[in-house]
Amino acid sequence: MPIGTHPSVTIRLRDSETIRVRPVTSTDRDQLARGFLGLSEASRYQRFFTPLTKLSGQQLAYLTDLDHIDHFAWGIESEDGDGVAIARYVKTGPAIAEAAFTVADNYQGLGLGWTLMQALALVADHRKFKQFEMTMLADNGAMAHLARKAGARFEAPIDGVMRAELDITPSIWVGLAEAGSLIGLATDAAQRA
């Protein structure tokens, strides 16, 4: 499916740039592969904890073939249709999901991470999840800041890796004007899966 033809919700960032938010689908494999190659080496390492140079076919399938209930991901596109971020959760236990975020280097620091946290927590709550687990490198200050802003509790780092737990509460997505539209997209994606 060509870029821009997926149903999406438009959100304005704090720098007034608009982005399109939509559920990731299996048709996004090529776009995800290109987006990954556009990340800096540091951003790739912070997300995957290993020096990956490209994603394998198996990894791309895992990251895009989703049921949109126990494994859900928001894909974020620029106004030009370029993939600029992904936020996902994967069920790890009863009412618990691992959350992960990736933002293209040139979109970091624009408030996109917080918008992703709001949108992801909103859908997770709708799916009856109560808690996010997050694993990050101890030196990933941006991810730690995002988790703290949402109210996460941190464990002491072990071997340079930190874990955080975050209760999923409405206080995270309060003020997200697009909440109803985002739930509609997530519900439609689950029905199509």
Image (cartoon, rainbow, N blue to C red):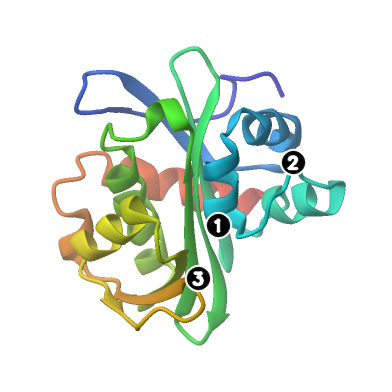
> Residue 139 lies in what quarter of the image?
bottom left
Badge 1 element: strand
Disc 2 designates what residue? 53
The percent position of residue 127, horizontal first and vertical second, equals: 44, 68
Q: Residue at x 68, y 31 (%)?
A: 37
Is 151 situated above or below 40?
Answer: below
Pick the residue in front: 34 or 123: 34
Which callout, 2 or 1, points to the residue nearer the camera?
A: 2
Q: Residue furthest front?
A: 159
The percent position of residue 121, horizontal first and vertical second, equals: 34, 61
Q: Residue furthest bottom?
A: 94
> Residue 108 lies in what quarter of the image?
top left
Decide if residue 78 is in sight here. Answer: yes
The percent position of residue 5, horizontal first and vertical second, equals: 59, 21
Chain-order first, disc 2 or disc 1? 2
- Mark 3–mark 1 Cα distance, whole angstroms, equals 11 Å
Which callout, 3 or 2, points to the residue nearer the camera?
A: 2
Badge 3 element: strand
Disc 1 designates what residue? 72
In the displayed structure image, the side of residue 152 where residue 30 appears, left or right = right
Chain-order first, disc 3 or disc 2? 2
Chain-order first, disc 3 or disc 1? 1
Disc 3 designates what residue? 98
> Residue 90 lies in what quarter of the image?
bottom right
Count residues near mark 2 (Cα–Cα under 10 Å), then give few for <14, some for 14-19, many for 20+. Answer: few
What is the three-letter code of the residue carrying label 3? Glu
Count residues near mark 3 (Cα–Cα under 10 Å), then give few for <14, some for 14-19, many for 20+. Answer: some
Is 174 situated above or below 166?
Answer: above
- Mark 2–mark 1 Cα distance, whole angstroms, equals 24 Å
